[in-house]
């Protein structure tokens, strides 16, 4: 091999080796850059995840606080309604005795989840400030339509028990009752069997038209 040819081959080999070194260095730098970019991306993703988690926690805290405030407002509304009801009752208790000797001051009849079943709350009141003692027994009955006929449902049919009366100003009578199937209540009656007084019957119209 002549000397010029050998020189050219040596030069080409040197150039090729140099090119390989440059390519390897470039690839190494690109690899490090890619690793750095991946690390930065992962760090950003982790930061975003933490921020999203913090937002969810804050949102849940706000929802919990809102729910708690709503429950407090509902409870306050209920208490205010009860206080207004009690105030109205006490005003009737202290009012001059110009009406009937005994009366139903407050009546609540509410449907429960089961068809035909109801809860009731009745306040038997003796107006006036004298407050003579009232004793005896109260019995609940309902006049209703059943199969096109008017019937009277007694305690046994309604699943209630007599209530012993013993009060001076008022007494609350509460509980639950069940109407037989295919029965439409019309009037609730409270029969009062009083000691040392004449018996009385107080009544009120049934407030729930469909009985469900």
Image (tube, rainbow, N blue to C red):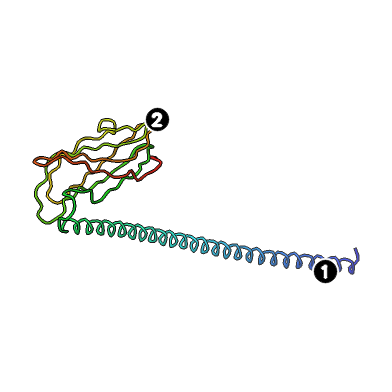
Residue 147 image label: 2
Residue 66 placement (x, y as % from top left): 39, 61
Q: Label 1 neighbourhood size at 10 Å, few (<14), some (14-19), many (20+)?
A: few
Which percent across, then down, holds residue 73? 34, 60
Q: Does residue 55 appear left or right of residue 3 in this picture?
A: left
Give the image location of residue 152, x and y in percent: 29, 33
In the picture provided, is 198 more to the left or to the right than 112?
left
Residue at the far right in the pictured view: 2
Q: How many numbered discs, if any? A: 2
Q: Which label sits in the foreground, 1 or 2? A: 2
> Which of 139/51 is in front?
139
Checking the image for residue 11, the label placed there is 1
Question: Is residue 210 or residue 199 the one in the foreground?
Answer: 199
Relative to the observer, which residue lies in front, 62 or 156? 156
Give the residue drawn at x 59%, y 65%: 36
Quadrant including the N terminus:
bottom right
Q: Based on the displayed image, in which of its 4 quarters is residue 198 positioned? A: top left
Q: Residue at x 65, y 63 (%)?
A: 31
Distance from disc 1 to disc 2, alpha carbons, whole Å, reads 119 Å
Which of the two labelled residues, at mark 1 and mark 2, occupies the earlier sequence position? 1
In this rendering, position of residue 148 left or right of residue 84: right
């Amino acid at each position: 091999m002549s000397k010029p040819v050998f020189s050219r081959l040596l030069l080409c080999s040197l150039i090729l080796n140099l090119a390989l070194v440059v390519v390897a260095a470039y690839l190494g730098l690109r690899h490090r850059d890619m690793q750095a970019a991946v690390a930065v991306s992962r760090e950003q993703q982790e930061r975003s995840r933490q921020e999203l988690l913090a937002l969810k926690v804050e949102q849940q805290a706000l929802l919990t606080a809102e729910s708690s405030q709503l429950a407090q407002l509902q409870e306050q509304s209920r208490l205010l309604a009860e206080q207004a009801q009690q105030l109205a009752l006490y005003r009737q208790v202290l009012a001059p005795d110009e009406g009937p000797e005994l009366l139903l001051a407050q009546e609540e009849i509410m449907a429960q989840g089961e068809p035909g079943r109801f809860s009731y709350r009745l306040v038997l009141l003796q107006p006036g400030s004298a407050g003579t003692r009232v004793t005896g027994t109260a019995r609940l009955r309902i006049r209703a339509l059943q199969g096109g006929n008017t019937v009277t449902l007694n305690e046994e049919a309604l699943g209630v028990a007599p209530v012993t009366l013993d009060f001076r100003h008022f007494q609350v009578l509460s509980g639950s009752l069940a109407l037989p199937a295919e029965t439409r209540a019309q009037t609730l009656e409270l029969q009062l069997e009083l000691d040392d007084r004449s018996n009385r019957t107080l009544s009120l119209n049934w407030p729930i038209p469909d009985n469900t």
